[in-house]
């Protein structure tokens, strides 16, 4: 079994591996564990020898496209995490309430703050998160399901 592995720069996304072999039912105990390990480590596809050049090239292009997509996702996710980490505790509380649909007045009542104080914190939070509206902010965050755990703070 031959294996070619391509690693993305700085391991930004899982490696793309191409494994070629003649899959033969007489050797399942040898192939299954190796194939399983390869896929668990991020392989994109398994190609049997002999492989047509077009199939190999298409598979490489598809794997690289997926790897690029994952790298972009991780980059945007990290940017959003950095923005979120720059918020103060009060701004995080206000973010949570904005996403829950609270108005500034309702937020002030809930947090025992003056309306103007809420407006200032909300403005600062929106600026730090690079959002122009609560809807844009919600859309921005909804693309990354892992942010749901961050909004468990009351």
Image (cartoon, rainbow, N blue to C red):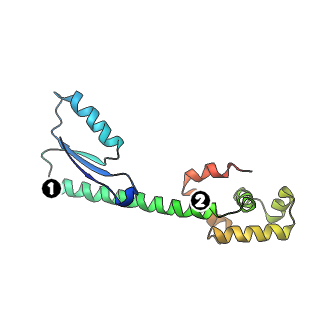
65 with respect to 74 (left or right): left
Rendering coords of residue 130 (x, y %): 61, 71
Which residue sits at x=84%, y=71%?
Answer: 116
- Asked if residue 64 lies left or right of residue 141, the reply is left
- Quarter of image, res 57: bottom left
In the rendered view, would you say 73 is above or below 1? below
Residue at mark 2: 141
Q: Which residue lies at the image location 28% right of the left edge and 47% below the top edge?
A: 45
Cβ atoms at labels 2 and 1 below 8 Å apart:
no
Q: Which residue is mark 1?
A: 53
Local packing at callout 1 (Cα closer than 10 Å; few below 14, some 14-19, many 20+) is few
In front: 69, or 12? 12
Q: Is residue 142 left or right of residue 4?
A: right
Q: Secondary structure at mark 1?
A: helix
Tell me the tag on residue 38: none
Residue 74 point in image, percent of width and height: 47, 58
Q: Position of residue 149 (x, y in %)?
A: 62, 48
Residue 55's x, y, as percent?
A: 20, 53
**Distance CA(mark 2)–CA(mark 1):** 41 Å
Is residue 32 shown above or below 55? above
Kindly give the residue lying farthest to the left in the view shown. Answer: 50
* Residue visible at 84% across and 56% down in the picture: 110
Mark 2 Cα within 10 Å, few/some/many (few <14, many 20+)?
A: some
Q: Is residue 28 above or below residue 138?
A: above
Q: Quadrant of the N terminus?
A: top left
* 101 or 38: nearer the viewer: 38
Mark sitting earlier along the chain (2/1):
1
């Amino acid at each position: 079994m031959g294996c070619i592995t391509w690693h993305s720069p700085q391991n930004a996304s899982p490696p793309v591996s191409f494994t070629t072999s003649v899959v033969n039912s007489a050797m399942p105990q040898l192939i299954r564990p190796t194939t399983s390990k390869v896929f668990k480590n991020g392989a994109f596809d398994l190609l049997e020898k002999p492989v047509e050049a077009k199939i190999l090239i298409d598979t490489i292009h598809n794997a690289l496209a997926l790897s690029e997509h994952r790298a972009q996702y991780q980059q945007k996710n990290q940017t959003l995490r950095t923005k979120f980490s720059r918020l103060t505790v009060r701004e995080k509380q206000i973010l949570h309430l904005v996403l829950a649909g609270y108005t500034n007045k309702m937020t002030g009542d809930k947090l025992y703050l003056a309306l103007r104080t809420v407006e200032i914190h909300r403005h600062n939070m929106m600026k730090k998160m690079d959002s122009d509206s609560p809807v844009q902010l919600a859309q921005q965050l909804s693309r990354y399901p892992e942010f749901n755990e961050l909004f468990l703070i009351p």
